[in-house]
Amino acid sequence: MIRLAMLKLTFGFAPNPVGITKAGQVVTLQRFVEGEPPTSGEVDEFLLLARFEPVKRSCWLWKKKVPNNDAEYWIGDAREDNFVKTPHGIVPIDLRMWGVPTKPASRSRKRRWKQ
């Protein structure tokens, strides 16, 4: 659910959660987005404009520093067939997104986890 919120905050578009399976997987529903597949160059430009930087382009892996937060947003599988080019711009339709802390946990927090 957090990942869906991250997508919505970052791109203004995310699937809607509709349930959770017994295995704990989130089931989502997403409206159909009409358009054409963008080129890899158009996807790169879209991500750069969204302030992401490539980490490993051969794996379609990008990251972005989150302002006022000690974390980065990472996206994977950012290849052209996971985006749609519409008259209004590029829309991500199937990205994997997660947060990565950029600072280690404090000592008191580390101790708490070891107990």
Image (cartoon, helix red, strand yellow):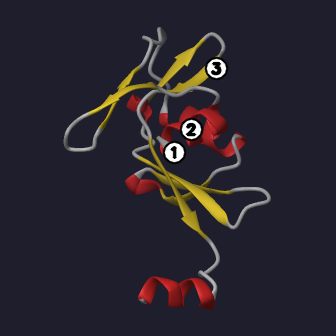
Please state which amino acid type lies under the numbered disc 1: Ile
Please state which amino acid type lies under the numbered disc 2: Ala
The residue indicated by pointer 3 is 89
Please state which amino acid type lies under the numbered disc 3: Gly
Callout 1: few (<14), some (14-19), or many (20+) C-alpha neighbours within 10 Å? few
Give the image location of residue 18, x and y in percent. 38, 23
Q: Are marks 3 and 1 in contact (CB under 8 Å)?
A: no
The residue indicated by pointer 1 is 2
Q: Residue at x 66, y 13 (%)?
A: 88
Task: Determine the CA span between mark 2 and mark 1.
Answer: 5 Å
Q: Residue at x 59, y 81 (%)?
A: 105
Find numbered disc 2 in the image and state the secondary structure of the residue it sits on: helix
Task: Determine the CA span between mark 3 and mark 1.
Answer: 25 Å
Find numbered disc 3 in the image and state the secondary structure of the residue it sits on: strand
Return the residue found at the far left. 22
Choose top left, top right, bottom left or bottom right for residue 64.
bottom right
Residue 64 or 105: which is nearer the viewer? 105
The residue indicated by pointer 2 is 5
Give the image location of residue 98, x and y in percent. 49, 53
